[in-house]
Amino acid sequence: MKNTNAFWEFFSSVKLAIFTFITLAVTSIIGTVIPQNEPISFYVQEFGPKMATIFKYLHVPDMYNSWWFLSLLVLFSINLLVCSLDRIPNVIRILKTNNLETDIGRLTKQRERHELPLSLPLAAAGEQVKGAMAASGWKTSSAERDGGILFFAEKGGWTRFGVYSVHLSILVIFVGAIIGSVFGYKASVMVPEGSSTKDVYARDSNHTPIPLGFDLRCDRFDLHYFDNGMPKDYISYLTVRKDGKIVLQKRVEVNDPLQYAGLTFYQSSYQAIENQYVVFLQKVESGESGNFIVAPRREMKWQEQNVTFGIVDMRNPNMFGQYQHKIWFSDGKGSPVEFWVDEARPADIKRDGVTFRFELKQRFATGLQVAKDPGVWWVYAGCTLMLVGLWVVFFLSHRRVWVWLVAGGEGTTAIVSGNANKNKVAFEKDLEKFADLIRSRVGKQAGQ
């Protein structure tokens, strides 16, 4: 019996589903075109004060977390759920129907049918029909009907639930998105080379610090260029330390993030730190080395090797903005030396049978985007379920076949009919092949 409850009718309406789907699609396009989570000054500059005020009132800068967008998602979810609950009982009823009670007159009038004269008695013809159905992969049931025998078989009844698995997948994706929105966050942080951080900063107007629960250190940052001087690639070497122990080290670049403790750190930007350089100094013979943060015209000491050095001058930036630097160096043995070195190009200093390798580069801070999304696996599961459901919806169908045998004349007449809820053209071809198989089997049996 049709449910006449007004609430139920409203939320099971296909019109409501179309309205909410189109509205979500249009607003999502707006949220994609208009940058999200920017300061209000950005919207004033880009769209003017009046439009910026409207944006603020409608929560456009943070649209996907706005009350009205979440309300649309809830409305769409309820609509999907009620639509499914309203229609699933009918699917169950179809699957539970005793198809051996189908009206014979209806079978003889179906569009997809074949009438076959068989030169075998009724019982023998029935055995051949049953064998043909088994050979075609049909699980057969039969009953005596109207002076004859009615056979029935079906395949893919479960495929009628394919569309509802798509509905369920959307709800699962929404659940994952809600979990990610409530329990996750997006943040960013700048970490200078040789330094570490215990916090990242939320993407809100206050840049609220969020504790990581561990130390994240940038050991090194490398910047590579194209031949025309444009940045080609930038790479961070990160170390995660917890309770004073190294638990993870990772080379991070664009599209190859670091993942730890439910957080994902994406390489997103970089920034040169003015008047600061990273110096790598190694005693070649022993392999002993050290890394130092150096400022121009300030003396730096490598205590273990009694080495003192400093940057005393710079000149001639190249097309990459890199300078040559004049270095003053002393190991306490003999007179100090001065030499010019290019950025990121090692130079060897030979001192009384000992070689020191000296490398200098601009110090950078690596910019990392940080995402915590505990709902991501729900989203992945929902997407997988959706793909499976769409495959079922578009490529599989519920197919039913009836064969009614009735004695007549010198043999038996077979009415082969059937239907499919989708892809009827392919089903017609399969039904014709099945009818040909019955003719072939009966013909061989009759010729023996």
Image (spheres, rainbow, N blue to C red):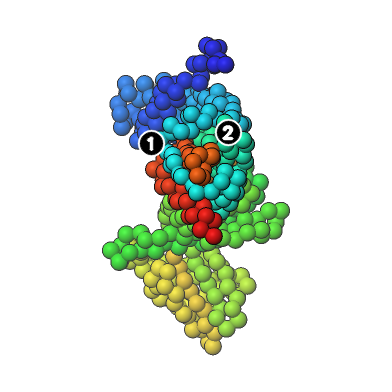
- Given residues 68 and 119, the one toward you in this image is 119
Mark 2: which secondary structure? loop
Mark 1: which secondary structure? helix
**Residue 178 visible from this viewpoint:** no
For the point 46% across and 80% down, the residue is 348
Q: In this view, does 119 lie above or below 230?
A: above
Expressed as whole percent of the image width and height from the top left, the position of residue 165 reads 55, 37
Determine which residue is flagged by label 1: 32
In front: label 1 or label 2: 2
In the rendered structure, the answer to whether residue 305 lies left or right of residue 444 reads right
In the rendered structure, the answer to whether residue 375 lies left or right of residue 75 reads right
Expressed as whole percent of the image width and height from the top left, the position of residue 277 reads 46, 61
Q: Are dots 1 and 2 in contact, CB under 8 Å?
A: no
Q: For the C terminus, which image quadrant?
A: bottom right
- Given residues 263 and 243, the one toward you in this image is 263
For the point 56% across and 26% down, the residue is 90
In the rendered structure, the answer to whether residue 321 lies left or right of residue 434 reads left
- Given residues 279 and 303, the one toward you in this image is 279
**Residue 339 visible from this viewpoint:** yes
For the point 35% across and 63% down, the residue is 225
